[in-house]
Image (tube, rainbow, N blue to C red):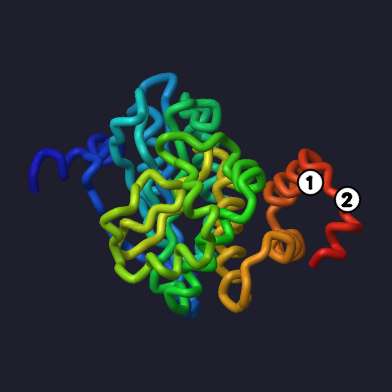
Amino acid sequence: MGDFEKCAECRLTVIYPYQTKKLKFFAAKDENTKMFFGIENEIECSSNVNDVSKIINANLGDLVYLKSDASINHGFEIVSYAMTYKKWYLSLERFKHFFGMAVDKGGFSQTATTTGLHIHLSREGFDNKEHLARFAACWYLNKDFTKIMACRDFNHYCSWNDYRAEHLTSYFINHLQTLKEQFDDRYNFINFRNRETVEVRLFNGTLRADVVFAHIQLCKLLVDYSKDCQEVKFDSMFQYLKKNAKSKILKQLFKIYEVQNKLDLKEHKKCV
């Protein structure tokens, strides 16, 4: 055993190189699903980075590990292992408590300009390429809505693609023939270039675990909505989301969208 392995302090403060990939899968007891969700959550530190990393490693190290990222000025990236939606739900209180402790030690993300939250979804969790195509198309139905869900503007690291938006489902079905598309820009806010996952790079970074879970819930709802629908339409999608969302954060974001777009809710309901 080397000196590093013997040193408990080193293990608590370790931040792996950016290229590191550690693969583990966690499901709730008796759960049978192929859909797993993993996050990359970038955070900055206003104080000693080791003080913040120690909190995360010591208390959440069975579910996450830490990596460096060149886009972060003074911090690191929290990378979760792959977990089912139910496992995320059952772990939420732990994340709330220890993310809160990280904030107390000087960690922050939501107000930083260098951070984002990326959510990976298992490709095997989709029924077929048409299901994946409909899921992807959902995000391009309404740019204003998607931007509000993101809690930030589109930027170089999570860019909007006008061609995709114009062609929607037909574009995705025609171009999902391979697992890794050579032509595709990995910085589009939906990234298909990973072999095992689809990456939604959309969201603002945050150390509020309830917000992280809200974004995971949104992804799951869109997976469920796009599974059986014959045609992806914004009105029916939005009504489905409002009916099935449990997260208070999501419900608040939906309300913001409605207020900002001055929707006549009665007329809106008739369109569905």
Q: Determine the secondary structure under disc 2.
A: loop
Packing grade of label 1 (10 A; few <14, some 14-19, many >=20) is some
Q: Amino acid at mark 2?
A: Asp
Q: For residue 184, say whether it is visible.
A: yes
Look at the image and tell me in which quarter the C terminus lies.
bottom right
Q: CA distance from mark 2 to mark 1?
A: 9 Å
Q: From the viewer's perspective, is 188 left or right of 23?
A: right
| Foreground pick, 191 / 41 | 191
Q: Which residue is mark 2?
A: 264
Q: Amino acid at mark 1?
A: Glu
Residue at 47% x, 34% y: name it. 155
Q: Position of residue 33 (x, y in %)?
A: 47, 76
Q: Which residue is mark 1?
A: 258
In this rendering, the label closer to the viewer, 2 or 1: 2
In the rendered view, tell whether residue 131 sits above or below residue 255: below
Residue at 56% x, 54% y: name it. 140
